[in-house]
Image (cartoon, rainbow, N blue to C red):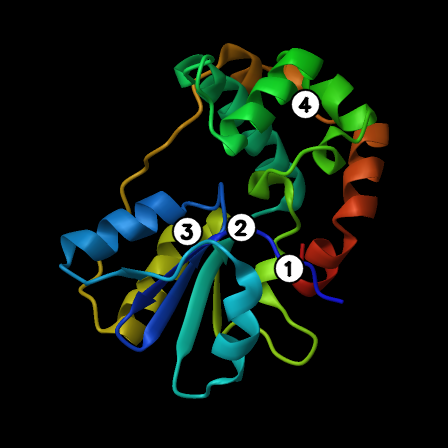
Amino acid sequence: MRRLYRIKVYIIMNNVFIHIPKTAGKSVRLALNKHQVDFTDLGHSNKNIDVLFSDLEIFTFCFVRNPAERLKSAFFHLIEFYDLIDKNNPTNFESEIISLKEKYGSDFKKFILDSGFKKFKIAHFYPQTLWTHTENNKISFIGRFEDLNNSWKELSNILGVKYKPLEHVNDTKLISYIDNKSDYNNEMLRIVKCYYKDDYKKLGY
C-alpha cells in the first residue's frame, strides 16, 4: 500500500510543479512567479500524484538532489529554523523540529548513525521517489539540483518561459553545515544509501 506524505503540489495551467523540499523549489517557484505564472495550490498530499501521473494531458515536473547532500542540507535547515519557532504555540510540523533539535542538537553524525531521518514526520527526510514515481508511472520531467540552471533552461523551453538563471534562495548559514565537521564518513554514507536506495537507483545517483 502506497504511503501518503505531505508535499507541496502546484497546478500551473496544465502543468504541475511538485516541490520536493531542499531541491531548489523556492528558486523555481520565485522564477515562475516573476513570469506571472498563476499557481493553484492542491495541498500537501501525494495522494494526488497517481491521478496526475496517469493523465497524459498534464505535464508534471520537479527537481531532485543527491540524497546524501539533500539530507544534510535538510537537517541543518531545520535546525536553523528551530530558532524561529514560537515554542509556546508550535504547529505539528514545528513540534517535530523541536523534538529533532532536542534529540540531536546540531550533531549531524549522531543524527545519521542513529537513523534519525526515520524517526520524524518531516517531509524533508522522506525519499524523493515518493513523489517522482508511482507503481505504474513517473513524473514527466526531472531537473537536477546539481545542474540547476541547465535543467531550468530546458524546463523554461518546455513551459514557454523566457530563460534567466535562477536566483539562489533559502541558503543554510549555520557554520556547522558549512565546515567539514558535517562531512560524511563511510559508515554514514552506507546508512544513507541503504535507506534511500530507491532514490539512488531510480533517480540515477
Relative to 173, say whether 6 is above or below.
Answer: below
> Tag 2's secondary structure?
loop
Relative to 111, say whether 68 is above or below.
Answer: below
Q: CA distance from mark 3 to mark 4?
A: 22 Å
The amino acid type, in three-letter code, at marker 4 is: Asp
Name the spot of residue 159 as percent of width and height, x first. 27, 72
> Tag 1's secondary structure?
helix
Which residue does the image show at 78% across and 53% down from the upper left? Answer: 197
Q: Which quadrant does the N terminus fall into?
A: bottom right
Viewer-closest of 163 and 53: 53
Tag nearer the camera, 3 or 2: 2
Q: Label 3: which residue?
A: 148
Tag nearer the camera, 1 or 3: 1
Relative to 50, say whether 63 is above or below.
Answer: above
> Tag 3's secondary structure?
helix
**Mark number displayed over residue 6:** 2
Q: CA distance from mark 3 to mark 2?
A: 24 Å
Name the spot of residue 49 as percent of width and height, x first. 53, 69
Which residue does the image show at 43% across and 18% down from the upper left? Answer: 85
Q: CA distance from mark 4 to mark 1?
A: 24 Å
Say if mark 3 contacts mark 4, CB within 8 Å.
no
Q: Label 4: which residue?
A: 183
